[in-house]
Amino acid sequence: MWSRTAAALGIGALALAAPAPAAADAGPASALRAEAGAFDVTLPTGDTVHVAGGGTTVTPAPGRDPAFSVRHSGGDLYVVPADRLGDDPERYNVTALHERRPAAPEPKAKASGELVTVRVRSIARDGRPGPGAVGFLNVKDASLGNAHRPLPGDPDGPCTDEGWNDSNCVRLAPGTYSVMGVVKTMPSWAPSTDGGKPLDYSLVGYPEIEITGDTEIVLDARKAREVTVRTPEHATAPGPGAVSHLMWTRGTANGQAVDEGVYLGDGSMLEERVFLQPTERVRTGTFEAYTRWRLEAPAITMRAGSRALRPQYYPAAYFSDTSDQFPRLDGRAEMRVADGDRPGADLRGRLALVQRRDGVPVAEQVERAARAGARMVAVYNDAPGVNDDPGGYGRPLKVPAVRLSHEEGRALLRERATVTAKGIVDSPYQYDLVFPEEGRIPENLDYVARTRDLARIDSAYHGDGAMTAARYSKRPWEEFALAYAHPVTGTPRTRVEYVSADPKTQWSAMAVTPEQPYNNAFPGPETPHVVLGETKWSSYRAGQRDAHSWNKGPLTGGVSAQSPIVRTGDLIRLRVGLADAARNFSDVYSSSFPNGFATDFRVHRDGELIAQTAYKPNGTLMTTPEDAEYRIEFDFANSAPWARLSTRSRTSWTFRSARTADLTVLPLLQVGYDAALDPQNRTRSRTLKLTVAHQDGSPAPLRRLSLQTSFDDGGTWTDVPVRDGVARLHGKGAVSLRVTAEDGRGSSITQETIRAYELH
């Protein structure tokens, strides 16, 4: 149950980001130029990569759900579906595809003298040849001998010094190289080199190896050690999507680096297991590898007598679009096991055990058992091991369904035992963990995540209905960040979130309201979404405790702290959207369908309208050098059926500006709202605290601050005294707010929010 999403790392940086709200962006109005760099690229597999000024979205083609191998090299971004690692990576060079460059390797310095022949062979963890890819990098100079080969590769293919061909051989100048690759281990019932879903992934190879003559290098996943994580204070289990990142970087002596890795989603592998081969410490350049984990309370556990089973839910995207469409067990249940394949079997209130079959959709098997009264269904594989093949997409499940291994299913069928199952739909805690290894990969990859060694963030998700949330991590060498988003459900929607405490690991997060569909197999009415992102990246100390809220009212006009309104010379960089009470920011713009968003953005200079757009207010404005008064106005209306509060807002910023020699943050005022709201944005407290500061956070000594309230959606307004930033409200129901503030330098803000929150 996930979507690919990410955060931008700064203006102009390339990032992988959440899909934009469902709205049209037909282009800016005259005088406001759109931020450069937005484009779409369709990969040869049909998967789409959308790059925009605020980030990038990777959308798999219908019926596809692969992991993605990502490489950043020579300024180009490569996004290779994991089931196409045998293809020429240049076919998936997103930068080159956009620039319409020929699909050829980037130029490299030719080595002088004799070349040697290097063959590479891969062995999976089960001893069979393993599929994957391997990279060769000269650690003295990255432009020399930077090559990739598929695994196991074509033994009859040509052996050349090209950056890529499909052979298992490469010609290199003698020297010191990094030879690192990913090897997948396939299920025993699948061909060893099949491009399908693997059991697991292994990072194997040698980050520093001397190559002086013709040789064969064996990448043996049997030498890799499993990465394990224990959380002593809380029960956790590596459910689908627990391992999301397997990343590494190799820096050369001359300072260049190649970053590579695999992003793994809920449906990327059959077992949530990753393995790393221990290495010697590098002596030339730099090396780092890490895995990223997301752990929660076990979503489903089962016991049959004294034996613990290992059930897993199927990836929700096979059968649903949103969390409410995917049935899961909530609580404890004791169920007799019944043979769901036996005609006439009594399945009422029981756990129906059925065997998967080629050509028979799992949804059909589950529906048949549900009609016979089954409370749950367990589908066991028809061959040794596990299998999550749904046999077809886009058909909902009628009752909760899990998958079991062939061995577990056969044992249950023999014993006809009573199974005790426990399901947790909404985990009250979550761990986001990054385990980096610098310079080498050690022998011991068993990690213990104690809460005293982590940072704790108490998170509250406000509003009605489920939301989607993700947390990003970024190491110093990474140029973009990607996370996998999951729904946040339950009431109240509060959760303790633990993150790795490390000064070199930075974190940021996002939340989307309402919950984003992750499959679109069951299309419903078009719906706009507010995609809120944190205002900064943060690293944490061990034992540090923080709190953060999402979508806490009011949701009103604002600017992004990561992309403030700035001026350089006669260019003003503009970006306006919505901000919540925690200053999380979202771009919003007019929807292309009814019952969505409607926005209007206007810029005035000395009273004259110079720019206007109903689309995304994100771009640059060429203006005049003289000192002038500017007024920026942003109107927002939300007519979506899910919108109960913060349905309309109007914000007007006034400030003065003239030509600047350096990049200058302009003196726009921002209003901060602090009301004691519950997760439904309700309160019994009459106290409202207001703060006013400039957009860069600097103090704004005020000349005046006033507040008006309305309890009839803006029909009538009442003045409310404000003393030292604190107001006492009188009334009951949805309160609308109108705030006006002016500082001593002539900057002012007027902000009106209809139905800001509820007073009880």
Image: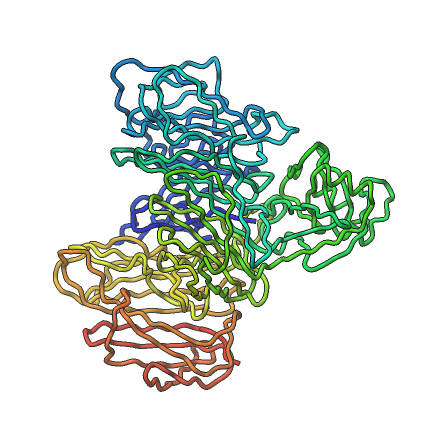
Q: Place residue 379 in its image quadrant.
A: top right
Query: Tell me, what colour scheme is on the image?
Result: rainbow
Image coordinates of residue 706 in percent, x first then y, are 32, 81
Residue extending farthest to the right is 344
Q: Is 271 drawn above or below residue 511 in the view shown?
A: above
- Closer to us: 243 or 226: 226
Instruction: Indicate left or right for 612 with 70 as reference.
Output: left
Q: Is 412 drawn above or below residue 681 in the view shown?
A: above
Total number of numbered discs in the rendering: 0
Q: Is residue 95 visible?
A: no
Image coordinates of residue 582 in percent, x first then y, are 40, 67
Q: Is residue 703 visible?
A: yes
Question: Which residue is found at the position 60% from the left and 45% from the top?
Answer: 315
Question: Which residue is found at the position 55% from the left and 46% from the top?
Answer: 241
Image coordinates of residue 11 in percent, x first then y, are 29, 50
- Closer to us: 284 or 270: 284
Instruction: Indicate left or right for 618 with 523 as reference.
Output: left
Question: Which residue is found at the position 50% from the left and 48% from the top?
Answer: 447
Question: Which residue is found at the position 41% from the left and 69% from the top?
Answer: 581
Image coordinates of residue 311 in percent, x first then y, are 67, 46
Q: Is 270 drawn above or below residue 523 in the view shown?
A: above
- Closer to us: 185 or 630: 185
